[in-house]
Amino acid sequence: MQGDMTAELPGMPSLGEGWLHSYIAKAGTADALRGDVGRGAKWWHALFEGVGRATEGRLDLLQQRMARQVQELGTAFRLPGEERERPWPVSAMPLLIGEDDWANIAAGVAQRAELLERLLDDIFGEQRLVAAGALPAALITGSRAYWRSQIGVKPPGGHRLHIYAADLGRDPSGEWRVLDDHVRAPVGAGYALENRLASTRLMGGLQTKLHVERLAPFFSAFREGLAAVCRRSDPRIGLLTPGRYNQSYAEQAHLARYLGLLLVEGNDLAVREDGLFVRTIEGLKRIDALWRRIDSRLLDPLAFDATSAIGVPGLMDAMAAGQAVIANAPGAGVVESTAIAAFLPKLAHRLMGENLLLPNIATWWCGQDGPRAQVEARLDELLIAPAFSEAPIGLPRGRPALAANLTDVERAALLADMHRRPMDYVAMEDVHLSTTPAVLDGQLVPRPFTVRVFAARDGEGRWTVMPGGFARIGDDSDARVTVMGEGAFSADVCVVGSRAVEPVSLLPQKVPIRRNPGTLPSRAADNLYWLGRYLERGEATLRLVRATLGGSIVADGGAALFPLTLDRLGTMLISSGAVASEPDEDEEDEDAPEHSYGATHDLREMALLALDGTGPASIATLMRYARNIASGTRDRLSGDVWRLVDAPLPKPLSDDPEAILARAVDLQERFSALAGLAAENMGRTAGWRFHDMGRRIERAMWGCRQVRSFGGADASADDLTTLLDLCDSQISYRARYLAGLAIEPVRDLVALDPYNPRSIAYQIERIAGHLKDLPALRDDGMAEVHEMIFYRIESAIRTATAETLDTTMMLGLENMLSEFSNALGTRFFLQGSEGFRMAGMTLA
């Protein structure tokens, strides 16, 4: 396996061999040889050798390349309270685990998942364990994740768990231990996938040479497992997210896109006659299963927490009726409590007749007299932690703490509270972790790690384990679990073997061909529509800024009405919302005409406000709106679109008019790139139609305003030149009319010419094409409200002439476009508590 990767000149030590020896020296021979490097030295040597050749021995370049891959993939997370996402931190060096070692891990994780399933069946079923004294009742009822209402409720398909995750640690002797169980809404499968994608791009063919097991079969099995317990053969499955402000929303969007699931929020869903439906542009559509990423407490305000604003009223009725599969079932989190771990070894014997293949960290629950006495006798050797999710008052800051590190006052407070409420505490051994190679400041260093491993039910109901996962790497050489905490960065976990791995994709080999783009939820249509409007509005604002600072009228200079044209530009900047208010009177040029913005200082100030101000149509505001909308539609946008929308605005280097103009040009190139991606890369689905309609409506409305402002009966040559600039029609006009500027030809070109892609008539024609392809609710052939409004718009523009395009007509047309937009939203963007419109809807 290593032949071509380890060959060196005779007598010359290989780079990989040098790194391996260096790492062992830093990690300590005993730890390194008993841990991953010792067990899989040949794989690590091959990895180091391949990395060394790819980077010419510079590990700092490797980490820089990994950072670029993460940025390219858009992998991100958000800390609580922060608005903007952060790049997901990934180590350039993966964690390698040999196939034999992994086989034991996979068997242990699958066994543990099945044990927790059987435990949940008893807790919410016959409760024989509590009745027999094998499980203290306080351990169940003391957990906030326990819901008495779920007793006797049998989930569709009979399974409460569909996906499970375990955090594993390996001690320096090489033994793997389970640190935590995750069953409510296990987080991280998407990050494991994204880590693998980034690592694969970085390593190239090296992973193939290492025979790294692929992740795709796991995700395929999970999707098939959810589909198998649904009542329909071709079910509709959604991923229920708390929303874009959730810490792992980017991961959820990636998973939904990769698995072909609908990414839905609570407001997207409704329960009717015990059936679960998603609100779409075609009405209510049946949804069969939800992979939830929100806590049970928030799932259904009628069954759990009545204050929840992100749940689905009646969802538990749909589940109890067998109409909706929920993965994982509500109440599953009761087995996540740290105290449960103390009883799992005996429960494994009782429920499965087996020993645990993966042992826990040794744990004592203080709610029983015997274990509590042992804890008090060995207090200085143990880690004291909360037994449940709530923090007891006896622990400093409510976090786990080593008793030996407590002050006398803290120790006394802990013991006092342990005597008052012993059931709130557990004690655990202080585990030291094995280390793995990590890149830090261009050097290979040992760092402690934990691994999150995932198991999911496949189509046969059996547990399948992801061959890998993701590792958390500590940022400190102290290898204690308590010190490492959540870890500083993550790493791909690669299961390596001695045999080549067959290529496997997510989809099976034989897939029926279909051209149906799938269901479009109303919220997604709403977001795409307004994303189009805001981006088009931003481009129009930038055209105003460019015309104000550097349009054709400035180049022609000296025209008598030049100040009046600039005054109209300034007025339009304010009326459009690009500038929040007029400049202060004491800052205006005393020699300038009244209400004029012709002074250089005023032009510069207004341009800066239009770019960076707080006006509702300033570029800063519009990009914030666009970013918020795009972040909630990540599963439907390409990485290129997201990067352009999410990129910070360029900072002003100077307030000089030329610098402002150059900045506006750069920003317009970004908006043009976004328009190009939408025009050339988006599939011609209903989602694209709403996005494009948003752009067309916004462009048509701006066209009406521009003709009103610069194409009136008193329009000057400067006005007409500005109008052509704003409509990007200068070249078309000059190529068509050699006689010079005239008001009626200009009006016709920018408003009525159906062949000019910037004209109002062209926008109306495109909107008409979109409306023909959108679904109708009525089956009697009669026009709906938004269609009737559009017919009036279409008639007005078709019967208009350049002579009749006066201010009154343009204002009337703009108002009709606004009315049409509102009617479109009312028809297609049904949200929240609005009543259901059932007429003509097919509940499919």
Image (spheres, grey):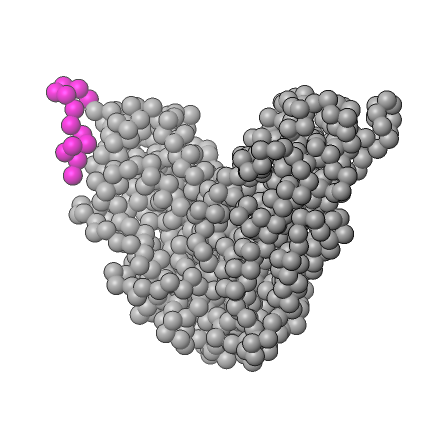
Quadrant of res 4: top left
Q: Quadrant of the N terminus?
A: top left
- Give 218 or 529, whichever is nearer the viewer: 529
| Residue 571 at x, y percent in the picture | 77, 38
Please, is residue 73 above or below residue 105 in the view? Answer: above
Looking at the image, which residue sits at the far left?
Answer: 10
Q: Residue at x 42, y 25 (%)?
A: 441
Answer yes or no: is residue 16 visible. Answer: yes
Residue 424 visible within the image: no
Residue 843: x %, y % from top left: 51, 76
Q: Which residues are magenta?
A: 1-13
Q: Nearer the viewer, residue 368 or 75?
A: 75
Q: Is residue 689 left or right of residue 391?
A: left
Using the image, determine if residue 805 lies above or below residue 523.
above
Q: Main secondary structure of the magenta part?
A: loop
Q: Is residue 153 magenta?
A: no
